Image (cartoon, helix red, strand yellow):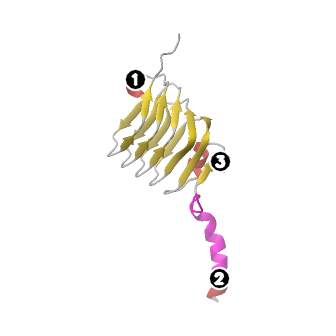
Amino acid sequence: MFSRCLPLLLVVVAPATALGAGGPVKVPRDFSTIQAAVDAAADGDLIEVSAGQYVETVVIEGFTGLVVRGKGRVVIHGGGAAALTLLECTDCVVDMIGVEGGPGHGIRLQLSERCKVSRCRVQDMDAVTTRRATIRRTRPIIAGLCTIFNHERAS
């Protein structure tokens, strides 16, 4: 009797597994926006973002082990307080993601632990210099090979 129940059990359980269990989740192939992919992700997933311009604000909140990696030149044009935020995350990675323009922070890490931001670029944010990249109440993070700068804008 057990062998007859097992296939039914697998069919019922399979949809509840992590979104990226069969490989990386790809933007825009699987989701049209980075935020939509993040909203559908589970701890430990890999989100690969194809080269392109993404007009959105991305908030990654409460994840453990999530990786968001750019493939090619990925640029987020955020309009909120920060173009990309990691909030209350642990062991998450943001790699090869650029943020440009906008009124606030470029990349913001807050209340996060052991997160890594690498090979990222923050450019032409409207906020004052000290707010282009912000790290607040965050335990050891690794930021490597990142570029943060502003071009002079004509009035």
Amino acid on which the number 2 mark rests in the picture: Cys
State the CA–CA distance, disc 1 to disc 3: 33 Å
Q: Is residue 146 magenta?
A: no
Marker disc for residue 129 = 1
* Residue where numbered disc 2 is placed: 5
State the CA–CA distance, disc 3 to disc 2: 34 Å
Residue 154, position as x, y percentages in the image: 53, 12
- The front one of 124 and 32 is 124
* Residue where numbered disc 3 is placed: 31
**Secondary structure type for disc 3:** loop
State the CA–CA distance, disc 2 to disc 1: 62 Å
**Secondary structure type for disc 2:** helix
Which comes before the other along the chain, label 1 or label 3?
3
Q: Is residue 20 magenta?
A: yes
Of badges 3 and 2, nearer the viewer stands: 3
> How would you rate the neighbour count of disc 2 (Cα within 10 Å): few for under 14, some for 14-19, many for 20 or more?
few
Amino acid on which the number 1 mark rests in the picture: Thr
Q: Are marks 3 and 2 in contact (CB under 8 Å)?
A: no
Amino acid on which the number 3 mark rests in the picture: Phe
Q: Are marks 1 and 3 in contact (CB under 8 Å)?
A: no
Marker disc for residue 95 = none
Q: Relative to 135, say whether 27 is above or below.
A: below
- The front one of 20 and 149 is 149
Question: Over which residues does the magenta segment extend?
Answer: 5-23
Residue 28, position as x, y percentages in the image: 65, 45
Residue occupying the point 35% across, 37% down: 136
Which comes before the other along the chain, label 2 or label 1?
2
Q: Name the magenta segment's main secondary structure.
A: helix
Horizontal side of residue 133 vs 9, given as left or right = left
Tally of numbered discs:
3
Q: Relative to 101, say whether 88 is above or below.
A: below
Residue occupying the point 47% across, 39% down: 85
